[in-house]
Image (tube, rainbow, N blue to C red):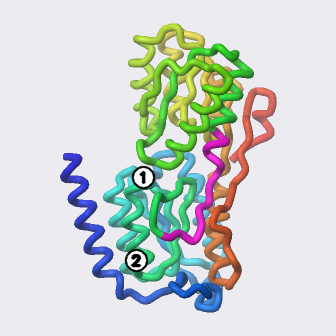
């Protein structure tokens, strides 16, 4: 099945690259004088494709809503597609955007490697691409708008040390394999954990999904009843882990990343200790603004950072998405 999926992805990519290479350009030029080659347009003149990894996660729903609202206010025409956490679906969605000759494409990648072929298809059609929340491991992107996920992982590890202790025994729930956020958050957490002496008993993927995290945590607890803390690479998994801990009647400190509203409630209730909060709505707005700036002839930074902060019981009322 895995090989079949690769064959399908390769076939779709080949068609996209061959078919779309002749499409007219709307933004990025191969010329070194990029600004002078841009056909300037107002926001109300733009047509933009938006590919979201999944709308089954409140984090990405917030991002989607922010983009949609901002586009409406500026009169920008957008089409949003939901990849449903499937790389082949996302590749097909982006191919459709290129076929429609949109002015720009905003992509929240399912997989940072698999998305490369889709970005290259857009490159061949001279359509600028902006990545949101997760980066891409190839192709040319106008900008990547994201939080510093390595820093977020480090902040989570530091929070474990502060609230549980230097010798804390930890279970880790990692995200979607291949996603840049999974890799960066994991690297940040594990590097910091190693430097301060935290003990990671086991690390397993729960695919950034709440139900998967619930089941995965229950399985992990069978072998690690001495666990003191759980680090989940996103809040959906943290909430799933919290349910597993409650069902087991255990007392374990849980730490997440994202800062969604339900996690704020869980922090108030004491079922989750802390989360490193990001701003998905801000990421979406900054990505769309980067498109506006690009078509206004302004220089756009290759990397656009969105702030992050630690949310605990002490400041939970100060921060909302």
Q: Nearer the viewer, residue 305 or 101?
A: 305
Residue at 43% of width from left, 63% of height from top? 81
Q: Is residue 296 left or right of residue 209?
A: right
Q: Is residue 274 magenta?
A: no
Q: Could you tell me if residue 302 is visible in this image?
A: yes
- Which segment is the magenta one? 140-152
Rendering coords of residue 202 (x, y %): 46, 22
Q: Mark 1 sits on what residue?
A: 111
User: Mark 1 to mark 2: distance in Å?
Assistant: 19 Å
Rendering coords of residue 215 (x, y %): 40, 24
Few, some or many residues within 10 Å of mark 1 (<14, 14–19, 20+): many
Describe the element under mark 2 as helix, strand or loop. helix
Few, some or many residues within 10 Å of mark 2 (<14, 14–19, 20+): many
Residue at 46% of width from left, 12% of height from top? 224
* Relative to 297, residue 275 above or below: above
Q: Earlier in the sequence, mark 1 or mark 2?
A: 2
Q: Mark 2 sits on what residue?
A: 98
Q: Could you tell me if residue 266 is visible in this image?
A: no
* Picture quadrant where residue 213 is located: top left
Q: Nearer the viewer, residue 246 or 183?
A: 183
- Please say if the residues under marks 1 and 2 sit with CB atoms less than 8 Å apart: no
Residue at 56% of width from left, 38% of height from top? 187
């Amino acid at each position: 099945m895995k090989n079949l999926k690769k064959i399908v992805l390769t076939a779709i990519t080949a068609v996209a690259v061959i078919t779309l290479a002749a499409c007219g350009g709307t933004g990025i030029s191969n010329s070194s004088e990029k600004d002078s080659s841009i056909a300037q347009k107002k926001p109300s003149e733009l047509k933009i494709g938006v590919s979201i990894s999944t709308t089954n996660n409140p984090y990405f729903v917030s991002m989607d809503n922010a983009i949609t609202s901002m586009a409406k206010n500026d009169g920008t025409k957008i089409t949003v597609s939901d990849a449903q956490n499937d790389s082949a679906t996302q590749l097909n969605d982006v191919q459709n955007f290129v076929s429609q000759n949109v002015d720009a494409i905003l992509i929240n990648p399912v997989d940072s490697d698999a998305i490369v072929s889709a970005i290259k298809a857009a490159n061949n059609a001279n359509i600028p691409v902006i990545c949101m929340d997760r980066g891409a491991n190839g192709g040319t992107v106008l900008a990547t708008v994201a939080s510093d996920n390595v820093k977020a992982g480090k902040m989570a590890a530091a929070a474990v040390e502060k609230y549980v202790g230097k010798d804390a025994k930890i279970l880790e729930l990692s995200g979607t394999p291949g996603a840049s956020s999974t890799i960066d958050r994991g690297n940040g957490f594990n590097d910091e954990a190693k430097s301060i002496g935290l003990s990671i008993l086991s690390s397993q993927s729960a695919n950034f999904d709440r139900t998967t995290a619930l089941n995965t945590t229950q399985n992990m607890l069978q072998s690690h009843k001495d666990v003191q803390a759980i680090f989940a690479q996103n809040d959906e998994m943290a909430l799933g882990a919290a349910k597993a801990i409650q069902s087991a009647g255990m007392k374990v400190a849980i730490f997440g990343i994202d800062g969604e509203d339900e996690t704020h409630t869980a922090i108030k209730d004491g079922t989750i200790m802390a989360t490193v909060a990001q701003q998905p709505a801000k990421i979406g707005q900054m990505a769309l603004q980067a498109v506006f700036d690009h078509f206004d002839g302004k220089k756009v930074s290759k990397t656009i950072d969105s702030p992050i902060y630690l949310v605990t019981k002490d400041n939970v009322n100060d921060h909302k998405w």
